[in-house]
Amino acid sequence: FFIPGCALMTPALRERLRGAAMVLFDATLWRDDEMITAGLGPKTGARMGHMSVSGPTGTMAAFEELDVRRRILIHINNSNPVLLDDSPERAEAVAAGWEVAYDGMELSL
């Protein structure tokens, strides 16, 4: 599944993704207020239609029980610290079973 923009993990979406071989999922922002705290804009992620990667209602939490074999973060804003190889956020995402997409990444099903 390719989901570059997602505002909310609905029950219907959760069931559709359950057990998928691979999901490429919206990782625009690590935190909902990321753009505001970085001084990059006045809107939250939720207001722009994006779930946060972190937090109790974020992407990582939403996928915990879905048994998706390969989970890849895509559509990552340049303000998202998960882009940095040595960031605590990257380490947290990797520890939770996520890959971070990169330019030139090739995928096979």
Image (cartoon, rainbow, N blue to C red):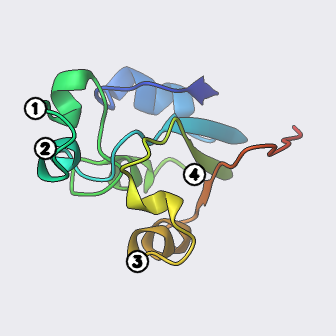
Q: Is residue 60 something that shows in the picture?
A: yes
* Residue at the limit of the structure toward the front, as seen here: 39
Residue linked to disc 4:
67
Answer with mark 3 or mark 1, whichever residue precedes in sequence: 1
Tag 2, which secondary structure?
Answer: helix
Q: Amino acid at mark 1?
A: Pro
Q: Do tag 1 and tag 2 residues touch (Cβ < 8 Å)?
A: yes
**Alpha-carbon span between mark 1 and mark 4:** 36 Å
x, y percent for residue 105: 80, 46
x, y percent for residue 96: 49, 68
Q: Amino acid at mark 3?
A: Pro
Q: Residues within 10 Å of mark 3 (few under 14, many from 20)?
A: few
Q: Which part of the image, by quadrant, shows the N terminus? A: top right
Q: Which part of the image, by quadrant, shows the C terminus? A: top right
**Alpha-carbon span between mark 1 and mark 2:** 5 Å
Q: Residues within 10 Å of mark 2 (few under 14, many from 20)?
A: few
Horizontal side, residue 102 vs residue 34: left or right: right
**Alpha-carbon span between mark 3 and mark 1:** 25 Å
Q: Nearer the viewer, mark 3 or mark 1?
A: 1
Q: Amino acid at mark 4?
A: Asp
Q: Residues within 10 Å of mark 1 (few under 14, many from 20)?
A: few
Task: Name the residue rendered at 52%, 78% in the picture.
Answer: 86
What label does residue 42 carry, if any?
1
99 vs 77: above or below = below
Q: Is residue 20 something that shows in the picture?
A: no
12 vs 62: above or below = above
**Alpha-carbon span between mark 3 and mark 4:** 24 Å
Q: Amino acid at mark 2?
A: Ile
